[in-house]
Image (tube, rainbow, N blue to C red):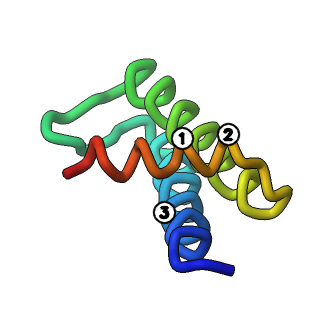
Amino acid sequence: MTFLDWGALVVGGGLMTSGVRAIRRGEAYVPERHEGASAVRLGWLWLGLGGLFVAGVLLDLGPVKALFRLFLEAAN
């Protein structure tokens, strides 16, 4: 496994954890505070994106790994 694979697993796991927490609490703190349905939708987005990153590494999917690299570049 390369460094980017490990990074995708860590970031994906973190996104999934944050997504579950946002769904359960019904609130999320990103640059601004989201409550209720908005926080739940954001939680599902994080859960799906994190699951996609983890699945990309576990199933060795090239396009998903490229998406993760794009995600990292966008964060810079």
- Amino acid under disc 3: Val
Task: Residue 24 in the image: state x and y as whole percent.
Answer: 54, 44
Task: Residue 29 in the image: state x and y as whole percent.
Answer: 24, 44
The residue at 27%/30% (across/down) is 34
User: Callout 3: 10 Å neighbours few (<14), some, many (20+)?
Assistant: some
Q: Is residue 4 above or below residue 59?
A: below
Which one is closest to the eye, mark 3 or mark 2?
Answer: 2
The residue tagged 3 is 11
- Amino acid under disc 1: Leu
Q: Is residue 46 above or below residue 9?
A: above
The residue at 45%/19% (across/down) is 37
Pointer 3 with pointer 2, Cβ within 8 A: no
Task: Residue 20 in the image: state x and y as whole percent.
Answer: 57, 49
Mark 1, secondary structure of its residue: helix
The residue tagged 2 is 63
The residue tagged 1 is 67
Pointer 1 with pointer 3, Cβ within 8 A: no
Task: Residue 73 in the image: state x and y as whole percent.
Answer: 31, 48
The residue at 32%/28% (across/down) is 35
Mark 3, secondary structure of its residue: helix
